[in-house]
Image (cartoon, rainbow, N blue to C red):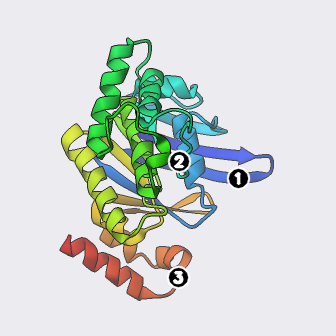
Amino acid sequence: MLEVTGLSKRFGGFTAVANVSFKVDQGEILGLIGPNGSGKSTIFNMLSGTLVPTSGSIRFEGREIGGAAPHRIINRGVGRTFQIPRPFRRLTIFENVALAGFYGQGRHSRARAFEAAERALVTVGLTTDRTAPVSSLGAAGLKKLELAKALATGPKLLLADESLGGLDETEMGHAADMLRRIRGELGITIIWVEHIMGVLMRVVDRVMVLDHGEKIAEGLPEQVAADPRVIEVYLGTDAGDVQAMTAARANA
C-alpha cells in the first residue's frame, strides 16, 4: 500500500530524516519507534503533506504523494491523528468530527459528511448527540475524538501519533484494542508512533526503529526488542524491559 524510498528531510544544515526506506502492506499495523528527536514526527509530517521532503519518494497505492498538499493526500485515503488533540472548542463533539468529514471526503454532500461523523463516533465509543460539548471530554475522550476525526475522513491508511499519551493503564488497553478493531473491522492499514512500548509490542505486526533520523532496525517485535543496537539507543542497557515486552507479546 505504501512504499517510501530514500526519504530525507533537511532544515538548513540539520538533517532530521536521512535516506529512510520502508514498505507497508495492506492490512498491516507497523509500529514506528525511537527516542525523542529521532525523526518520527518528521516522517509523519512528510507522509501527511505538512512537510515537503528534501529528497526521496512516497508512493501510496502506486501514486506519488510526496510533496502533495495535505488535503489532496487525505482525499487519496491517508488520514492522521495528532499527539496533542486540538479540537475546535466552540464546536460540539459532533461538529468537530463532521468538519473533518467535509474536509477529508472531498466535495460531497452535508449528509455524507454527517454519516461519516456518526460512523466514526460510534466506532470510537463517543456520543453521537449533536449538542454534546467538547468540554465534557477528559484525556481519553479527547484521544477518541482525535481518532474519530481521522476516521471521518475515510482513510485507507491511518497515521496514529501517540494515541496512548496521557492515558492510564486501563485506558491504554482500550485504545490499543480500538486500533486492532479498526484494522480488523474496517480494514484500515495503520502506522503507529508510540512511546508506550509494552502496549505497542502487543498490537503491531512489525516494528521500525529510528535514531537520529536513520532507520536502525526493522522486523518482528521479538526480533527488534532483542536487537543490541535498539537496546542501546532506545531501551538503555536494561535487558529486563526487552524481556518483559517479548513476554507480553507472546502472551497476548
| Camera-side residue of 206 and 146 | 146
Instruction: Tell me if 193 is positioned left or right of 124 in this view.
Output: right
User: Dot 3 corresponds to which residue?
Assistant: 236
Of the 4 image quadrants, the one containing the N terminus is top left
Q: 10 Å neighbourhood of mark 2: few (<14), some, or many (≥20)?
A: some
Q: Residue at x 31, y 35 (%)?
A: 128
User: What amino acid does circle 3 point to?
Assistant: Gly
Q: Residue at x 64, y 61 (%)?
A: 37
| Camera-side residue of 160 and 73 | 160
User: Dot 2 corresponds to which residue?
Assistant: 85
Residue 127 appears in the picture as rendered = yes
Question: For the residues carrying marks 1 and 3, which lies nearer the camera in this image?
Answer: 3
Q: Secondary structure at mark 1?
A: strand
Of labels 2 and 1, earlier in sequence is 1
Q: Percent from the top left, x then y, of residue 112? A: 33, 17
Q: Percent from the top left, x then y, of residue 240? A: 39, 88
Whole-angstrom CA distance, mark 1 to mark 3, is 24 Å
Which residue reaches farthest right? Answer: 12
Q: Secondary structure at mark 2?
A: loop
Q: Percent from the top left, x then y, of residue 164? A: 43, 60
